[in-house]
Image: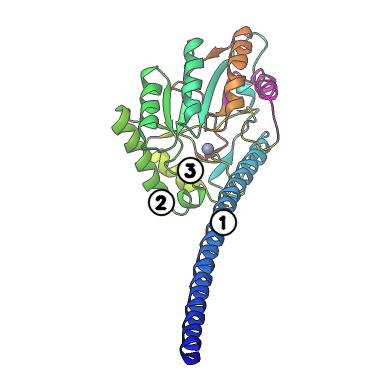
């Protein structure tokens, strides 16, 4: 009798132990899954935020580099010449009618719709230096830019400096992709280009000579800018700041090419745009899309000597 009881007890004990071990394993796996998910989420957020910081730093470097080219200077490389942004022939006289080319880089995005609506409200044509996207909305934007009489221009397919400026082959391939995409979607054989970071970019310590030569050989004209709205900086800025930046510099030049961005987060650019347009119109400026008649505004150019 006693032997049977202790036998039962032993079995119960064993079952209890097995259950506890099983529960322990299940709990361990559950905790492990939860911890993994939390860690992965944290790492994803970290990667995205680091990517943003990298972009911001690149943008800041570009902004920092641009103003250096305010006086004539010969580059140490004999084949490249820094353009004199304040060259006499482009300085405005008091009674000049100012020509202003508004340009928007890095789109299309949802901001592009808004920029196009504003330009339409004022019946003004501008220039969009687009990057490559194949989603339906982006294709719609490429088409709308063309249909509404604006100039569609290239700003590379990927906008990734490390890839585009890795070699001439990489540059040529990227150029081909964006040119073909625009042609396939809009039927426009695009002949205008803006280098990511500008022709004077020092982002990847790239010698721009061969890229400029390549564009020239392809019959493609590149444009930089001589007026920066400041919408690419990381410092907090308001719509009023952008308006002030543009209006302060535009009056200096017969021809101004103004740098804006219509990428996703540029809500302040959209806010500033109607004010900029109204103030330019009050100045009597004409606002035009880039064409073959546009005075070349280039930070760096190949020496013709
Ligand atoms: Zn850009």
Residue at (62, 15) in percent of width and height: 275
Q: Distance between the residues labelled 1 and 3?
A: 32 Å
Name the disc covering residue 52, or none: none
Ligand 1 neighbours mark 3 (CB distance < 8 Å):
yes
Q: In this view, does 79 lie above or below 10?
A: above
Q: What is the residue that sits farthest to the front in this orientation?
A: 1
Query: Crowding at label 2, few (<14), some or many (≥20) Cα neighbours within 10 Å?
Result: some
- Magenta span covers which residues? 236-258
Q: Mark 3 points at which residue?
A: 159
Residue at (62, 49) in percent of width and height: 76
Name the disc covering residue 38, or none: 1
Q: Mark 2 points at which residue?
A: 170
Q: Is mark 3 on a helix, strand or loop?
A: loop
Find residue 73 and report its horizontal and vertical position in percent.
65, 39
Q: In which quarter of the image is residue 245?
A: top right
Task: Assess whether residue 251 is covered by the magenta stretch.
Answer: yes
Residue at (54, 12) in percent of width and height: 286
Query: Crowding at label 3, few (<14), some or many (≥20) Cα neighbours within 10 Å?
Result: some
Q: How far apart are marks 2 and 3 (CA)?
A: 12 Å
Residue 71 vs residue 7: left or right?
Answer: right
Residue 244 vs residue 144: left or right?
Answer: right
């Amino acid at each position: 009798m006693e032997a049977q009881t202790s036998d039962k007890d032993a079995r119960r004990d064993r079952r209890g132990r097995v259950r506890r071990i099983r529960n322990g394993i299940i709990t361990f796996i559950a905790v492990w899954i939860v911890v993994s998910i939390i860690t992965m989420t944290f790492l994803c957020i970290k990667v995205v935020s680091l990517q943003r910081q990298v972009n911001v730093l690149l943008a800041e470097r570009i902004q920092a580099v641009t103003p250096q080219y305010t006086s004539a200077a010969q580059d140490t490389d004999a084949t490249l010449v820094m353009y004199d942004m304040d060259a006499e022939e482009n300085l405005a006289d008091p009674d000049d009618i100012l020509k202003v080319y508004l340009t928007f880089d890095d789109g299309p995005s949802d901001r592009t719709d808004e920029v196009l609506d504003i330009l339409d409200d004022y019946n003004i044509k501008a220039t969009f230096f687009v990057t490559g996207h194949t989603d339906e909305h982006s294709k719609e934007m490429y088409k709308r830019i063309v249909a509404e009489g604006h100039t569609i221009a290239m700003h590379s397919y990927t906008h990734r400096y490390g890839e585009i400026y890795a070699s001439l082959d990489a540059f040529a391939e990227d150029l081909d992709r964006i040119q073909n995409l625009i042609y396939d979607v809009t039927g426009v054989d695009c002949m205008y280009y803006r280098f990511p970071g500008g022709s004077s970019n020092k982002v990847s310590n790239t010698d721009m000579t061969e890229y400029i030569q390549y564009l020239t050989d392809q019959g493609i004209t590149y444009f930089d800018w001589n007026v920066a709205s400041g919408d690419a900086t990381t410092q907090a800025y308001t719509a009023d700041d952008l308006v002030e930046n543009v209006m302060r510099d535009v009056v200096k030049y017969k021809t101004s090419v103004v740098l804006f961005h219509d990428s996703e987060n540029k809500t302040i650019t959209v806010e500033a745009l109607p004010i900029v347009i109204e103030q330019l119109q009050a100045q009597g400026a004409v606002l035009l899309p880039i064409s073959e008649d546009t005075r070349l505004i280039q930070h760096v150019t190949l020496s013709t000597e």
